[in-house]
Amino acid sequence: MDKQKLAALLQESQIPDTQNLKAVTADLQKNYYAHPESLFLLVEIIAAHDNLGVRQQAAVQAARLVPKHWGKVTKEQKAAVRQHLVQTTMQEPNAACRHAESRVIAAIATIDLEDGEWPDLLPALFNLASNSDVAQREVGSYIIFSLLEANPTCFGDNMGKLLELFSHTIQDPQSADVRINTMMSIGAMLLMFEPEEDPESVEALQTLIPSMVNVLKDAVQAGDDEKTGHAFEVFQQFLAYESALLGKYLKDLVQFMIDLAANVEADDDVRSQALSFLAQTVRYRRMKIQGMKDMGQQLTQKAMLIITEIDDEEDDDEMGPARSALALLDQLASDLPPRQVIVPLLDAFPKFAASNEAGFKKAGVLALGTVVEGAPDFIASQVKQIMPLVINLLNDADVGVRHTALVGLARLADDIAEELTDFNEPVMNALVNNLQAAMATEADPKAAKKNVEIIRSVCGALDSMSEGLDAEFMKKYAGELINNIGVLVGHEDYKVKVAASGALGAIAESLGEDFTPYFEKIMQALGEYLTIKGSDEELALRSGVLDSVGRIATAVGAEAFKPYVQPLMQSSEEGLNLGNPRLRESSFILWSSLAKVYEKNFAHFLPGVFQGIFQSLELEEEEITLQLTEAEKEIAGTDEEIITAGKRVRFRKSDEDEDGMDDDDDEDWDDIGISQEALEKEVAIEILGDVITYACSGDEIAMYLEKAIEMISPLVEHTYEGCRKAAIATLWRSYARVFQLMEEETGASWEPGLPLKEAPTQTLVKLGEIVSKATLQVWHEDADRSVVTEINRNVAATLKACGPAILAQSDMMKEIVTVTSTIITRSHPCQQDLGDEDEDQEVEGSSEYDWLVIDTALDVVIGLAVALGPAFAELWKVFEKPILRFASSEAENLERSTGVGVIAECASNMEAAVSPYTAKLLTLLLKRLSDADQETKSNAAYATGQLIFNSTDSATYLPHYETILRKLEPMLQIKDARIKDNAAGCLCRMIMAHPDRVPIPDVLPALVGLLPLKDDYEENTPVYQCISKLYEAGELTVQGLTPQLIPVFQAVLSPPVDQLDDETREVVRRVVGALYTAKPDLFGGNQDVLKLAGVA
């Protein structure tokens, strides 16, 4: 084997010639790297070659070949190689090469030390790292780092000695390299610490933290980007392990990072990295941050000030301090309680919005738009104070401020569009004005560019607002908007075309059938883009138009859209094969829209639909991250990624030039390691659930479900949480659909309780086994809040829709009770800081995401009550304590209102079996009927009515009737519709339970004056049952109120149909019929109600 030839091939491989590189690589792999001798030759090249790049590449290849060939080397040869390699490394003048050579030593040492060989290495390294010669200390400290990185357990018996060494080298007075090598070594050995088993080592580690901070400070001050990056990365590594490793220093470290991020004199990249560390700390140490007094407030306020630096000309892809601060705010809103983040932000917002400086105005509205996703409920409760300020910014004289306000508005509307409806008029006027101004001809290129941004942002805001824009409101603006935006579909900028098509889809969605006059014209305008192919821009446009057309189909309905279905399906199926992931996703989304519109009439297209979805689910995922040197990146001809064998391979920088942690925002950081195939599968699985739910009858279920389940089931354990969520949801939706079809076929409805009254089909039993097994695999242990929340939602919905059938699966009941109890006591892994799963971390308050996990788990409890009926009374003993604790919470209104609501639903479903719990529940509810929080008070009225109506323990509740009536009376006068509705329902249940204990002549006129109910239609059931019973009993007060009730009956029998369930509708019809039979003259001016009741 020729050493010179090998060196020449290594040198030749550095020339970025793809064809030649393939030949060189094949030669190296076949004739050299496959043979043990190549390892010796590479070591000789490392030692003697005069070309820096060749030496470095030889070292990289040698390190990779050591695991393959070292075991075949003789004992004598090994000793020679070790000595030669150490001497070479000591003498290497170039740091990059020296580091690569150190990794070869580490690779060999990892094997040797496990085999009991090279016993003198570790003592030699300790001596080297503490040598008086600074050069030797630098080499020794880096070899120690390389060995720790390769296999930290090599130092398992020497931790104390290693920490003692580091206490000196971390403060090396002569060498910044020794200091950073030590810091990287500490990061590499973190997994060796066991806080409970070896607290002394943890204490020794913590004494090093102040010096580590000094290493970062020195690197920042020296402007050394490489060392700064390494230092940040080490602090990031701490977040992956138990919080005890940082201990009391976490708060000091956070404060240091805040000050560094806020320092405008510091380098932007350094500030961004500090902000990134803070965002990750909030994510992985949210309980610790929440427990630090005023820390959430300080982080929020400092982030807002940093955002004021945002530049109109800043590249969207650049993560400067301002954008990094927005990412931090996003994380804060997601992980801390609203009082720690949203309250201080909203306190500051008016000052920012009224500032004379454009930067402050932009920062205020961008901050607001950023945090709404993490705290939509709290933000929604404050819209009356927020929106006038946002509207002012939408009309600001500064075009940059207006643009930013449009972006902020779109983000608000994404999450709380329906809560913004009171401000639709001024918002729409602002949108129209901005659009008209931006569509004017502009000669200045800079101004023209800004106009394009304004146009896109107006379209984006309309798109986001669609759920809050009803048809009656939109009819006033539809003509002008559609004409203007229709013109933009032909704009020269592709991104404007995409935005315009999205806005048209949104307008159609808002108008519904009222979009019909514009339908044909818009379809003609959009139609030409449904078949374009070529550039990525063209395919992105085709994708956007496909999304818009699906929304238009939903608006105009099945009959009007029918002529377009066949060509659209052809276009969407063709789009699957054009190599554009976004276009494939849009095809799937279109299929979902059409399945919902056409339901079983979509069956003709199902073969192609299932084929397309299955193909996506069969995509192979293989995204490999490689650590490359500069020389190897030159070989690959790129520093980003290559595609090999159809797989995408990403590169990250080698240790020699790594900048530390990527300073992208958290969302982008989350997506690192997620392949495009996984993202596509997520969408495909969701759409599969829609198709099964809406478009599949028994025949299609028999044809496709088995394969679908077979493909979905493994994905519940996918590394990407989006795939896990989608897979679990689709499994449960499939179960619900099969159950629904079974009931339709048998004509029997499920009854609560176990054992099951009706035996399910074998198909359903088998599917239930698969669904329950797949769910329980992840439900107990998944650390992602969104996954656990999704499981909770689906289990709860299925229990309510399908009853107890799924509970008949082996151990399913026990497992559901166990995991739900874990969640509502805040002890589930997804509710803990990373690495601290066994630690008691309960603190006051929750972020809305954290509460959503609990809220949906409580919905599972309600689902169990619905499915089991009176038999749930035994399970109530398990859940009673945590639910009552929520209902008794003095700190959080949301906890109280939710807890009381759960009590109401459980009491309703337990029926008479709730009786033993009457005294304890009534004591709490009497207090909550006077709660300062309106939502809690409303739920208390509902719960009190349910308890009285269902409990047989009248001896306990009757003495409190007058008190309850007294507490209900002021509720009937409150402006909020829901509280009046629930008070009315409670009053009616009390009358039905004990009409003799209620002063009906006094209360009934006030009750009838509230009708028809405006908000909580569920309460119509007790209201009209009560009225019916009073008529049947010949009660004089209700008879005297008949003239007032007849228009009420007409109103509830009219649309919207969801005012009454079928049973209550029949009750109202019977009352109308009986009244008409007894006194037809009462209906002289109300003939319509007779038609609605089916009487005339």
Image: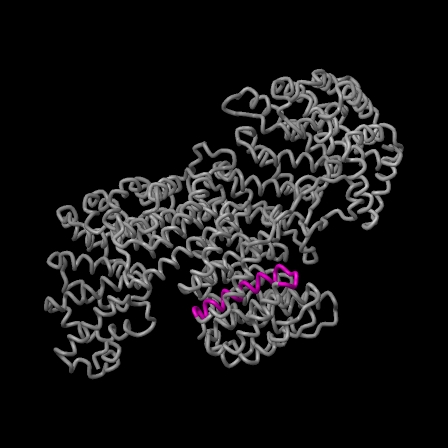
Q: Where 166 sits versus 8, above or below?
A: above
Magenta highlight: main SS: helix
Q: Indicate left or right for 984 with 270 as reference.
A: left
Q: Position of residue 485 (x, y in %)?
A: 60, 74
Residue 655 shows in this picture: yes
Q: Where 506 sits versus 663, above or below?
A: below
Q: Quadrant of the N terminus?
A: top right
Q: Indicate left or right for 93 with 34 as reference.
A: right
Q: Where 745 sits versus 660, above or below?
A: below
Seen from the viewer's position, the closer of residues 477 and 91 is: 91
Q: Residue at x 80, y 40 (%)?
A: 631
Q: Quadrant of the C terminus?
A: bottom left
Q: Position of residue 510 (x, y in %)?
A: 48, 71
Seen from the viewer's position, the closer of residues 525 and 422 is: 525
Q: Quadrant of residue 92?
A: top right
Q: Which residues are magenta?
A: 577-600
Q: Position of residue 792 (x, y in %)?
A: 41, 49
Seen from the viewer's position, the closer of residues 334 and 158 is: 158
Q: Residue at x 76, y 48 (%)?
A: 638
